[in-house]
Amino acid sequence: MNNIINFKHLRQEKEKQFEAGFIQIYKDFHHYLMKQVNIREKVRAKHFLKDLTKKDVSFNLEDHIFIDWFGFDYLTVQDLTLFQLYLKRSDIKAMNRSHAVQQAVLLANVLEPFKIAQLTGSDIVVEKLDTKESARFKRSVFPSKLQNHDFIFVRNVPIFDYNLPLGSFVLIEDSTIIKRLMFHYKSQSNIGWRTFLKKYAIQYVMKGKTV
């Protein structure tokens, strides 16, 4: 019995460490974007996003939607994301293995759409749109306004049995937007789901609202 209790405690402590690690990397990178990326890159990204979404983009960052896309999905003239450039500045030899793994997970991260499938006491069960598989978020980190069958976008990372959200939740109130997204994806040849989202998700995210 003690072994079981110790295992659960160890798992909980590890989960907290992973959560804290991801959140710290995200905060440090956000600070880098706001303080060290030059204004010309932001202006270039703004014009690119305006052309892509046919929507004007203000520098209030659209409730952080713009800065999130700018950091992780926008490609610079070097054909790299700003997060990739940020990692190039990091001292890889000095970081521990766990930190390096977390950075690698964030490299592959996308603004991912889900359908809310079930609201329980402590969990939110969501459905992935591409595979129909289930994922879980802790209710404590989930906006209270969201309801069953809502469609959302959120950048997130898996931690054991749960997904940790990073950045804002974006609610898509018009289900036809999701239908257009899925039609768009299926019309693409030789492109995977996450690659598609990396390139095109922002077009649909900009049609939603942060919650």
Image (cartoon, rainbow, N blue to C red):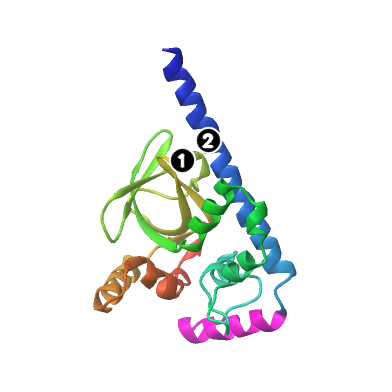
The image shows residue 211, relative to residue 42, as above or below, that is: above
Is 171 colored magenta in this rendering? Answer: no
- What residue is shown at x 32% (from left), y 55% (from top)? 128
Residue farthest to the right?
A: 35
Residue 72 image-quadrant placement? bottom right
On screen, residue 41 versus residue 80, left or right, reads: right
Q: Earlier in the sequence, mark 2 or mark 1?
A: 2
Task: Name which residue type carries label 2.
Answer: Lys
Under tag 2, what secondary structure? helix
Indicate which disc residue 138 carries.
1
- What residue is shown at x 33% (from left), y 67% (from top)? 193
- What residue is shown at x 69% (from left), y 84% (from top)? 40
Q: Position of residue 82 (x, y in %)?
A: 60, 71
Indicate which disc residue 151 carries.
none
Under tag 1, what secondary structure? strand
Task: Name which residue type carries label 1.
Answer: Lys
The image shows residue 83, relative to residue 138, as above or below, that is: below
Of badges 2 and 1, the one in the foreground is 2
Residue 183 image-quadrant placement? bottom left
User: Which secondary structure type mostly characterizes the magenta part of the structure?
Assistant: helix
The image shows residue 133, relative to residue 10, as above or below, that is: below
Residue highlighted by disc 2: 14
Residue nearest the observer in this picture, 93 or 83: 93
Residue nearest the observer in this picture, 111 or 115: 111
Q: Position of residue 74 (x, y in %)?
A: 53, 75
Q: Position of residue 184 (x, y in %)?
A: 30, 76
Viewer can see residue 147: yes
Marks 2 and 1 sit apart, C-alpha to C-alpha, by: 16 Å
Residue nearest the observer in this picture, 31 or 104: 104
Q: Which residues are magenta?
A: 39-56
Q: Position of residue 195 (x, y in %)?
A: 38, 70
Viewer can see residue 168: no
